[in-house]
Image (cartoon, coloured by chain):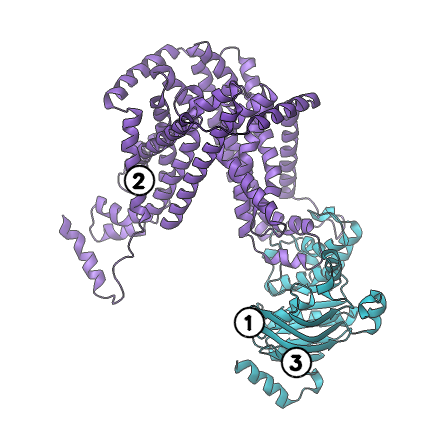
Amino acid sequence: MTLEKPAAETAQHSPSITLDGVVKRFGDNTVLHGVDLEIHPGEFIALVGPSGAGKSTLLRLLNGSHSPTEGRVQVLGREPVRCSRRELRRLRTEIGFVFQQFGLVGRLTALENVLMGALGTLSMPRYGIMTYPKQLRERAVENLERVGLVDQRFQRCDTLSGGQQQRVAIARMLMQDARLVLADEPVASLDPAASISVLETLKKLSAEDGFTVVCSLHQVDLALEVSDRIVAVRDGQFILDKPTNATGEPEIRAIYQAHRGA
Amino acid sequence: MPTTLTPPGTRGRTPAPAPARPPRAPAATWVIPLILGAVTVFGLWWIDVRPAAIAAGFEDITRLLGRMFPATTGPVPELAALVVETLQIAIAGTGIAALVSIPLAAGAANTFTGPRWVQWLCRTLIVVSRAVPSLVFAIIFVRIFGLGPAAGALAIAFHSVGMIGKMMTDVFEEISAAPREAVNATGANRFQVFVATTFTQALPQMTSFVLYRLDINIRASSILGLVGAGGIGVALQRSIGSLDYPRAAGIIAVIIVLLLVLELISNLVQRAVSEHAGDTKHSMTFPPGKELSSPGWNAPRVGRSAGLLAGVVLFILSLSALSISPDRLARGWENAVAMLTGFVPPVFTAEIALGLFESLVMALTATTFGVLIGLVIAVFSTDHLVKVPVLGWALRGVIVVVRGVPDIVYAIVFVAALGLGPFAGFLALAISCTALASKFFTDALQNIDPGPIRALEAVGAGRLQAFVAGAWPQFVPSFIGNSLFTADLALRESAVLGIVGAGGIGFLLHESVTSIDYQSTAGILIGLIVVVVTVEQMARWARRKVI
C-alpha cells in the first residue's frame, strides 16, 4: 500500500494526483462517471468544459472537501477520505486553492490577507498585521512583490480591481509553499486582459517554484495559451487528455463543440 | 369628493393589459390591528380605565407634582458617586456581555459546523437571556451577590448577552462565506478561520451594536437601584421609601439630564464614527512604516487604537470598581447553587398565570394607545400632512425629554399619586409607548420617498388625498413593524413594573425572591420566558408577512 510510505519519499517519485475510477454522486445526480487521471509534479493542467461538467466537483475531491462515491483519490501521496480532521488540515496546508471569488476579507489590507495563508503553520488565531511573526511578514511582502502588488500592501482589498484581488489571493496561496495548486475558475469574473495576466502570473510562479497546477477554465483559448496539458470534461467524463502542444486543430474544434453543444 | 379619486385608477387601467389591481394586502395587515383592538377593549375594562378615573388621576398627579417642588438633590458628592457607579455598572455589564456573546453567537449561527447540541444550547441561552428583563436578573443577583453594583453589572450582562448575541448571530449568518472557505482551505484551524474571516468581517457592525447597547444599558442601570443593585436608582429608592418627594424629583431630574447628555454624546460619537468609516475606503489603511512589512501611523490608525485603548481601560476600571472579591464570589456561588436547587420543582399557580396575563394585557393595551397617539404626533412632527415647523420641533423636543425618563420612574410617580395597581402601570407604559412609537413613526415618515406625494399634488390632489394615496402605502409596513416592536418592548417593561406596585407579574416575582420561595420564582420565570418568546415569535411572523 502506497499509503504506508513516508510522505516525503512518495512526493519525489510518484504522481501528484492519481484518480482511479472515481464516481461522484449527489443523491440521484451523478456528476462524475468513473474518471481516471494521473498528474505529475510541476505540470500545469487546464481542466476545460462547460459549467456543470464536473470541474468544480473534481477540484473539491482533490482537496478533501468532497469524498468520492466510488473509486480512489490520491493527492500528494495521501487519500483525503482516509485523513483525520487534523491530517486533512495538514494536507490542505500543502495544497494551495485559488477561488473564482478570491475569498479575501475586503476590509483588511492586502498584506494581512496574504498573511492568512500562513495560519496553517501557526497555532493561535491572529488579528492585525503585527500579530504575525516578522519572518512571515517579510515573506508576505516578498510574495506581494512577486505578484506585482507590493505598493498596494496597505490598501484595503475591496478597493483593488478584480485582477489585483486575484493576485492578492495568489500571493496568499504562495505563503503555503504548496506543492499542488488547485484553481477553480480563477479568472471567470475578470475581464480578458486581467484574465491573461493572472494566468500568466500563475504559470510563471509555477515554473519558478515547481508546483503543480490544476486549473479549471471555461475559456478554451486561455487554456491553450497557458497550460502544459489539457483535460476536457463533459457530462462527468474526460473527452480529451493531451499535452497542449500536441492538441491538433480537429481536437480543439471538438472541445469547442463540446462546449457549445451542451 | 369621492369622484376625484376614481379617474387616476381608471386611467391607469386602460394602458396596462396586465393586472392593474394592486396585490391584495396580506391578512396580517388587518388581523393584527383587529387582535390588538380586541385586547385593548378588554384591557380597558380589566384595568378599569375610565375617562373619569383619568381626570381624577390627573388631579392627584398634579397634587403630587406640587409636593415634589421645590426639588432638591441632597448631598451632591454622594449623588455624583452614584452617577459614576451607574456608568460603571453599564460599562462593565456591556463589556462582559460583548465578550461572552461572541462565542455564543458563533455557536448559534447556522454557519456553525460543530455538534448540534452546542448550537442548540447557544440558541437557547440567547433566547432565554433576551426574554428576561435586566431588572428581573437584578432581583435574582441581589439575592445571590448581595446589594450593590456587582449584582447590577451581572444583571445588565445577562440580559445584554441575549440582545447582542442575537444581533451578532444575524450578522455572522449574513456574512460572505468566500473568505471563510478560502482560509479554511489553507489548513487553518476552526478558531483561526473564525477570527481571520467571520469575526473580522463582522467587527464594524459588532462595534456599533455594542455601543448602541451601552447606550440602552446606561438607561437600564440608572434604575437597577430600585431593587438594590447599585447606581443612582439606589438614591431614588431611598428618597421614595422615606417619602422625600422633593429629593425624588431632584434625582429624577438628574437621571433625565444624565440620559439626555449621554444621548447627545452617543449621537456625536456615532456621527464621528460614520464619517470616519469613509476615510479608509478610498485610501491606504496605513501609510508605509519603518519596514516594508510594518504599517506606519496615520490619524485614523491613532484614532482607532486610542478608541480601543480607552474602551479597554474603561472596562477594566469599571470591573474593578464592582468590588468582587474571591470570598464574595464563593458566597455568591453557594447562594446560586441554593437558588438553583430551590428552583426544582417549579411551581405554577393560578395567581402567577393571572399576573402574567395582567402584564400582557397592560402591555398590549398601552401599545394600542401609544401607537395611536404616536401616529398623530408623528404626523404633526413631519410636514407631509401638516406644515407647522414650530409645532414639529416642539413635539420632537418633548418626545426626547419624555423618552429620557425610564418607564419605571413614571410608574413610581403614578403609584404614588393613584395608588397601587395596573392602572398606574398602564399609564406609565402608555406614555413610554407613545414616546417610542412617535419616535419610530417620525423617523419612518421622514424617510419615505416624497416623489409620489409631489406627483399627486401636481395632478391637483388635496393634501389629505396626497398623504393617504402617496405617503400612507409606503409607511404601512414600517408602521406595523414598529408597532409590533413597541408591543415587544412594552411586554418586557410591564413584566417589571410590579416591582414598584404598578401591576403585573413583577410584584409576585419580587416577592417570591425576597421571601425565598424559589419554586414560585422558577415558575414565574418559565411562564415569563414562554409568554415573551411567544409574543416575539408572533410579532416576527407578522412582520415577515407584512414587510
**Horizontally, is A257 left or right of B252 in the view?**
right
- Give the quarter of the image for residue B420: top left
Dot 3, crowdedness within 10 Å: few (<14), some or many (≥20)? some
Asked whether residue B396 is in view, the answer is no
Q: Residue at x 71, y 85 (%)?
A: A245
Q: Chain of mark 3?
A: A
Q: Residue at x 44, y 14 (%)?
A: B248
Asked whether residue B459 is in view, the answer is yes
Amino acid residing under circle 2: Ile
Q: Which mark is residue A224?
A: 3
Residue position for label 1: A29
Amino acid residing under circle 3: Leu
Dot 1, crowdedness within 10 Å: few (<14), some or many (≥20)? few
Dot 2, crowdedness within 10 Å: few (<14), some or many (≥20)? few
Residue position for label 2: B35
- Give the quarter of the image for residue B537: top left
Amino acid residing under circle 1: Asn
B104 or B58, nearer to the observer: B104
Q: Position of residue B142 (x, y in %)?
A: 56, 22
Q: Residue at x 79, y 70 (%)?
A: A210
Q: Earlier in the sequence, mark 3 or mark 1?
A: 1
Residue furthest out toward the bottom: A250
As helix, strand or loop, the secondary structure at mark 2 comes to helix
Chain B palette colour: purple
Q: Chain of mark 1?
A: A
- Give the quarter of the image for residue A165: bottom right
Chain in cyan (letter): A
Distance from label 2 to label 1 (Cα)? 49 Å
Q: Position of residue B49 (x, y in %)?
A: 28, 24
As helix, strand or loop, the secondary structure at mark 1 comes to strand
Picture layout, residue B3 above or below residue B431 = below
